[in-house]
Image (tube, coloured by chain):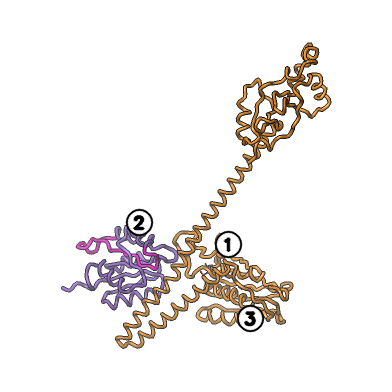
Amino acid sequence: MVPARPTVLVIDDDSTHLYLTRSLLEDEGYRVHCHQGAFGATQCLMEVSPDLVLLDVNMPGLSGENLAQLLKRAQDRAPTRAPAAPRRVPIVLYSSNDEDALRQSVLDHGLTGYVCKGDPPKLRERVRAFLGRAP
Amino acid sequence: MLLAGDLVTSQQSVPSAMLVRQLADRFFEEPELDAVALLEDGRACGLVTRPKLLLKLLRNFGYELFARRPVLRVANPEPLRVEAAAPLAEVMERALCRPRAVVYDEVLVEDSGRFRGLISVRDLALQQSQALAASLAQREVASARAAELEREGAMRARFLAHVTHELRSPVNAIIGLAELAQRAGERGQVEVVNERLSLLHSSAAGLRGIVGNVLDLSKMDAGKMELVPERFDLSKLVAELGETARVLARKKPVEVEVELPPEPLTLRSDPQKIRQIALNLAGNAVKFTDRGRVVLALARDGEGAALRVSDTGIGIRPEDLERLFVPFRQCEDAQVRRHEGTGLGLAIARNMAELIGGRLTVESSYGRGSTFTLTIPSLPERST
Ligand SMILES: Nc1ncnc2c1ncn2[C@@H]1O[C@H](COP(=O)(O)OP(=O)(O)O)[C@@H](O)[C@H]1O
């Protein structure tokens, strides 16, 4: 059986950035699900059950870091649908912020990692690395 | 810092050979005389204070006993002596450490052994407590100022972080979109190329807007924004703005109405600045109103005019009203941004309003709508 293509959930409030990320990752062969804005993102996470979450940091209403906490908690509470894969979905910050600030946020909030916006090759490389496999 | 010499209020002295009777006469004749120093060759060899002397003379046979003696007999031969250059705090300390029996109000001040005068401990205490109060007040002012500077510094740092993010975000979008457009081009997907180019275009336009705002703000911050006054018809300008607002509201059930005075409203001001302020107000009014009306109302106001931009939109919470005019007002509460937009528009608008000599104020009822009012004075001829 061929494993399904990995799904990436992208959460961002900026529609241009959503379009951009979707196009870049789809070109690579990933399945991409976009969610605009912070609200409803936890719901979306449980419905989509992606293999990786790319999360913008600067969103109106709820900071990405806080949302990341919510996402982590939502996963802990959800009944594990696939007992073979009880692993938490990696959450990666994806932002135009300073690299230093992102690194700090990742450490502070126990997240998987970060990618700076504005560097498509780096995005491809990191997503592949975080997923641990090619699309 | 004050020194002992500065507090000298009396230089009263008598030769040490003077008779007690003579000195007593002086004390009787000069009621404000409190004490005298006894001098020998310009050097103080004792101190006589009024209470001490009178007490001695009033005792039984006191006068008979002392009247014909030299004053040295009734003097304190070892009064407290301080150097004129001694700091007041030191004098105070020494004055308070004297044995009880020899505590007088007066202290001898000398300059390398030569008599300079007398100071009173009362004056000293008064002076010291005033100095203390002043230094406390000074310290309080200084620490308040330091706190303010620190706050300003923190605000600036956050401002910079914010600007940086606001600039980077569209730049990153532009870079990504350019790459995507290129890829689509290589594959010959003309429509996809066009889609990506038009997104790229609007990202670049947004970036231009932000850069313009930041430049405006820093120009105003440095006091470098110039006023270009001319005489013009404000009614016409507002009518044009109304057209622009209608275009902005095209896709919403929002009516844009323009109310103008019956005659043309001509005055002298900077039309460019007014247009920018009013465009921001009208733009916000449309942006934050989902249905209803946006009204641009122009009226005469003395020599000048008042432009009111009101809407039936979401309104503004009372506690947010003044923060609107602070650049990136959302900075205050952590990393949470409340709305889209850079949050610079109103800060710039208020600054510009002040530049043209007017005022920008806001009234709002949360959930029902807002009214921004810009007053525009007519500037005097040939003044800027
Ligand atoms: N007419 C209005 N109705 C409701 N809220 C408004 C209105 N105008 C401005 N605001 C509030 O003030 C904020 C600051 O506006 P502004 O300085 O122009 O910057 P922005 O670019 O964020 O719109 C807006 O984000 C909005 O929250």
Hue used for the chain lettered B:
orange
Q: Nearer the viewer, mark 2 or mark 1?
A: 2
Whole-Å distance between the Cαs marked 2 and 3?
A: 53 Å
Counting from the top left corner in percent of width and height, residue B320 is at 55, 62
The residue under label 2 is A108
Does residue A129 appear left or right of residue B36 in this picture? left
Hue used for the chain lettered A:
purple
Q: Secondary structure at mark 1?
A: loop
Q: Are marks 2 and 1 in contact (CB under 8 Å)?
A: no
Q: Secondary structure at mark 3?
A: helix
Residue farthest toward the front in the current orientation of the protein: B41
> Are the residues under marks 2 and 1 on the same chain?
no
Counting from the top left corner in percent of width and height, residue B71 is at 75, 19
Output the chain of dot 3: B
- Which residues make up the magenta segment? A78-99
The residue under label 3 is B237
